Amino acid sequence: MSELEQDKYRPSLDIIIAIKENFNSHIEWLIFGDTPVSKNTIFNLAIEAQELELISLFRELTKEDRDEIIDFIKLKIVRY
């Protein structure tokens, strides 16, 4: 914990999401220390917590699995 306070360690996105969900806090506050607006904002993009989780999980996949997920999403979009 002291390494976090001294800026020697940066938590991963997974840890930030876990803290957000377990303590019902806001992503903006955890990352920037700012009071949140109605949506999570990172790099001036509105990103919902569910989208952050999707990105975090997506990064854990192999390239082959990532390609498969992208193809699946494209299929879902075309079908509906």
Image: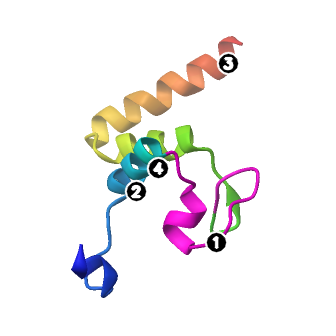
Is residue 51 rendered to the left or right of residue 19?
right
Q: Main secondary structure of the magenta part?
A: loop
Is residue 25 rendered to the left or right of residue 12?
right
Q: Nearer the viewer, mark 2 or mark 3?
A: 2
Q: Give the Cα distance between marks 2 and 4.
A: 6 Å
Q: Give the Cα distance between marks 4 and 3.
A: 33 Å
Q: Nearer the viewer, residue 80 or 42?
A: 42
Residue 9 magenta-highlighted: no
For label 4, the crowd category at 10 Å Cα-Cα, with few meaning under 14, some 14 to 19 and many 20 or more, is some
Marks 3 and 1 close (CB-CB < 8 Å): no
Give the mark nearer the N terminus: 4 vs 1.
Answer: 4
Q: Nearer the viewer, mark 3 or mark 1?
A: 1
Q: Which kind of residue does numbered mark 4 sit on?
A: Lys
Note whether 41 is above or below 60 in the view shown.
Answer: below
Helix, strand or loop status at disc 3: helix
Residues drawn in magenta: 24-41
| Residue at the disc numbered 2 | 16
| Residue at the disc numbered 3 | 78
For label 3, the crowd category at 10 Å Cα-Cα, with few meaning under 14, some 14 to 19 and many 20 or more, is few
Marks 2 and 4 close (CB-CB < 8 Å): yes
Q: Give the Cα distance between marks 4 and 1.
A: 14 Å
| Residue at the disc numbered 1 | 34
Q: Position of residue 42 (x, y in %)?
A: 61, 64
Q: Give the Cα distance between marks 2 and 3.
A: 33 Å
Numbered label attached to residue 20: 4
Q: Which kind of residue does numbered mark 2 sit on?
A: Ile
Give the mark nearer the N terminus: 2 vs 3.
Answer: 2
Helix, strand or loop status at disc 4: helix
Helix, strand or loop status at disc 1: loop
Q: Nearer the viewer, mark 4 or mark 3?
A: 4
- In the picture, residue 75 is in which quadrant? top right
